[in-house]
Image: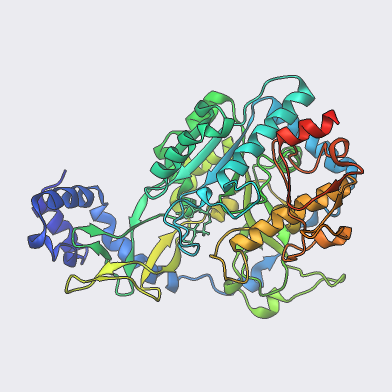
Amino acid sequence: MLSLEQVRQGLESAGQSHVLQFWSELSEEERDSFLQELSQLDLDGLKDHCESPARSAASLPSKLDEHMEPVPPEFIGSVKKSDQSALEEWENEGLLKISENRVGVLLLAGGQGTRLGVQYPKGMYNVGLPSSKTLYQIQAERIRKIQELSDRKHGSKCTVPWYIMTSEFTLAPTEKFFKENNFFGLESSNIVMFEQRMIPAVDFDEKVILQGKGKIAMAPDGNGGLYQALVDNKVLEDMKKRGVEYLHVYCVDNILVKMADPVFIGFCVSKGADCGAKVVEKAYPTEPVGVVCRVRGVAQVVEYSEIQQKTAELRGPGGELVYRAGNICNHFFTRAFLQDVAEKFKGQLRQHVALKKVPFVDMCGNHVTPTQPNGIKMEKFVFDVFPFSRSFVVFEVLREDEFSPLKNADGAATDSPTTARNSLLAQHSRWATAAGATLLDEHGNPLPPTASVSAGDNQAARCEISPLVSYFGEGLEKLLKGRTLPSPFILDEKRAKELQAQ
Ligand code: UTP
């Protein structure tokens, strides 16, 4: 631990002397813990860190538009445009790799979820499904099911290890939650939780924000902090020990995520890709999602705000948007690629400026909860490694089947608990209908098959199918064909056994 004098000098040369302004008011204990916290800061790099938002703003890439092009079609796979046999081939390839224990999944769960606004990790959120399952439970059950499907196909017992990146905010509650829930039926030794780094939040005057008189406001370093965290926590070594060669990386908030999606993995592997991105077609030109494209011949995600409107609105001969590949934070990486990033490239990742509301103590020592963004958190993004890929591919999937993120609290028009819940229930209703069931609404009236299509449709039948029964709609015909299902209807393992016995 550094001495107070060393810390004082370090802060002074970084232009951050205000950090110690309440030192004389702190108790002995508070001083100890504050000094400990400050000793762990990179004081030499602090000046640079505080100035980085201004530097990033000044170095915003200009005239991207002129150098942009879509990813060429030969590097794109598509669920909609590929024939059934190609999709099956990719799926078989993916299931084979899974059965050989060569596939892992990695969850990015270090975010603070400030827009959703709950005090616990987002993965513990229950969006109000009939089963009351949380996001973590849904994901765990999908892992169990994909292991089972691979086992069944290849007659072996396989494991898909689950790597979970957390942060100071999410690690302890996530660990506790998993333990309390008996790891949702997974082997605890196959769940590897690790922590990403935290960095100080700064205000608009390049000053570190004090969260308390003896505490600075720290924030996780963005989901691109993954690459440093992999090194800090020896995660790549763990992957190597287990023989994991392919990793499916995803965000905690997408309720429809296909864990270790064999079709996506099989596609990427069969193309010899080292890095891949799942995308959905952008809904409209100004939709605030990043677009996967090439800039100066190199794969990249470009934000809507970085390009001109006329570029975003460009359309091809068939009327489709030229830049329609919407990034959904669902990536494929080989371990070899991640090793390369860890060794050579992680220091080159761009820093993004995120404006956030950061509670603070003002000059007079009053605690303030801001209503407007007052702070800057510098974040790295997980997709910023795409330019380092030597063989990059894109896989286009259907939004209604694979993407419905939980970002906002209820009341917001998009990406809320209600939209997430409805997306999942609508998908499961589609599966049940396709399997030959008739769904009833809450008053017992039959629903036309199309009623379940729209995620926002509040007429959608409340039909929920446990991932332990079906991973992606398969195997339902023998259970549901010709049946009339009340609403709500939960198809869990117990109910599936009963239906099978009838
Ligand atoms: P978001 O960008 O949606 O951020 O993260 P967030 O922190 O969850 O929510 P807001 O912006 O504060 O409302 C996308 C994904 O990246 C993860 C999140 O947990 C989520 O899965 N993430 C984000 C990290 O793992 N670490 C970070 O530092 C930031």
Which quadrant is the N terminus positioned in?
Answer: top left
Q: Nearest the camera: 35 or 301? A: 35
The image quadrant of residue 210 is bottom left
Residue 96: image quadrant is: top right
Q: Quadrant of the C terminus?
A: top right
Residue 77 visible in the current orientation: no
On the question of residue 488 being in view, the answer is yes
- Which residue is painted at 18% across and 48% down in the image? 33
Residue 146 left/right relative to 412: right
Q: Is residue 270 above or below residue 405?
A: above
231 above or below 317?
Answer: above
Q: Residue at x 14, y 46 (%)?
A: 2
Given residues 310 and 494, the one toward you in this image is 494
Q: Residue at x 69, y 42 (%)?
A: 273
| Location of residue 302 in the rendering, given as x and y in whole percent from the top left corner | 61, 65
Residue placed most toward the observer, 291 or 115: 115
